[in-house]
Amino acid sequence: MLLFNQSTIRKKFSVQLRVRTLASSGLIYYTAHQKQVDYAALQLQEGKLRFSFDLGKGQSVVSHGAMISDGKWHMVETDYAKRKGVIIVDGQATEAVNVSGDGNTLDVDGKLYLGGLPLGYLTKNVRNITHSIPACISEVTINSKQLDSLVSTFAVNKCYATIQKGTYFDGSGFAALVREGYKVRSEINITFEFRTNVVNGVLLGISNAKIDAIGLEIVNGKILFNVNNGAGRITASYEPKGMTNLCDGQWHKLQAMKNKHHIALIVDGNVVQTDNPHVHSTSADTNNPIYVGGYPADIKQNCLTTKNSFQGCLRNFILIKAQQADFLDFSEAFDLSGVFPHSCPAA
């Protein structure tokens, strides 16, 4: 949150900033009156910018056609002056939009929320996109005045010099998805790409409180796919041959498949299959959330041997069951610790 002098922006409100993101949606900034009658907001929606504001007599909205969720830096300016609003992206301006109603001053508190809103803060007027944006934002000015009075931050980190698509796991935490519990049962097909320099780390764990579970992990540079359908754990293990190394900081493709009592692991096109002596035990009756990259200390995981959180990048994470593909969007995780969706530091 940044502070500014609200008396200087009543007639003219011009915000300029640089932004870089690979996300398609999120809140870039928001400022409002205490009662949220007047407000101004800049949102990213489907990769494009939307500037909305209200002078107390009705909402005005102006949208820009440029796609900015490309991982490149963009100079963005939103202006309200003389009862008109406009967005300028990299020097290209939209048509000006007239102010709704007969309001002529923007009366807000002197607080600019940048990149998201405080926990528990509910917006009355901007409802569609209020979630935080995984982005780098710099050089913020209001009416050409640099904003330096940073009052508070939450989950704000340094920017990477160069980025690529993916989700970065810093080795300290995990992402938790499907709060109500994910049911593996008889079949599952998991595919994703990973990049790491660390030889131990949890990739995925889905369990129940008793025995049934599946787990994917890197242990001493090997990939292990562990499955327990209730009769005992079986493991498909892939160990790179010769000079190849899975923890070399390069992208590697992994596919783990379970079909009833059969399990298989494909790493960079190399197939490993394991015979299961428990042929009559076919269903992994899991009901806990999906944990990716690690798991909380108080949660039991029946098919993981390492407790180390994964350090590196994951991308294109897909779970397929009965022809239905679920893409895991880590920005939608209900619990996220040490995980940074949508961008990885480039190798």
Image (cartoon, rainbow, N blue to C red):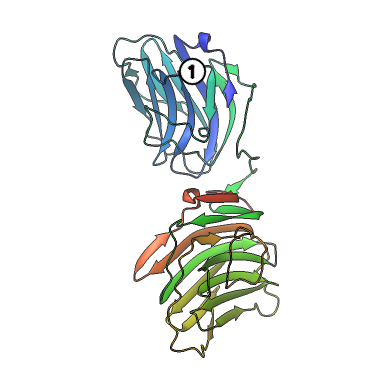
**Element marked by disc 1:** strand
Residue 194 percent across, percent down from the top left: 58, 63
Of 210 and 226, nearer the camera is 210
Residue 145, picture quadrant: top right
Quadrant of image for the N terminus = top right
* Residue 10 versus residue 59 in the image, above or below: above
Horizontal relation, residue 258 to residue 292: left or right: left
Amino acid type at image mark 1: Ser
Residue 338 percent across, percent down from the top left: 62, 50
Residue 154, picture quadrant: top right
Of 213 and 194, nearer the camera is 213
* Residue 310 versus residue 80 in the image, above or below: below
Residue drawn at the location 43% of the way across and 70% of the way down: 184
What is the total number of numbered labels drawn onto the structure image?
1
Within 10 Å of disc 1 (Cα), the crowding (few <14, some 14-19, many 20+) is some
Residue drawn at the location 50% of the way across and 75% of the way down: 212
Residue 70 percent across, percent down from the top left: 49, 44
Q: Is residue 250 at all visible to an observer of this figure?
A: no
Q: Which residue is mark 1?
A: 14
Residue 9 percent across, percent down from the top left: 49, 12
Quadrant of image for the C terminus = bottom right
Farthest-out residue, front = 210
Q: Is residue 146 at all visible to an observer of this figure?
A: yes
Farthest-out residue, left = 101
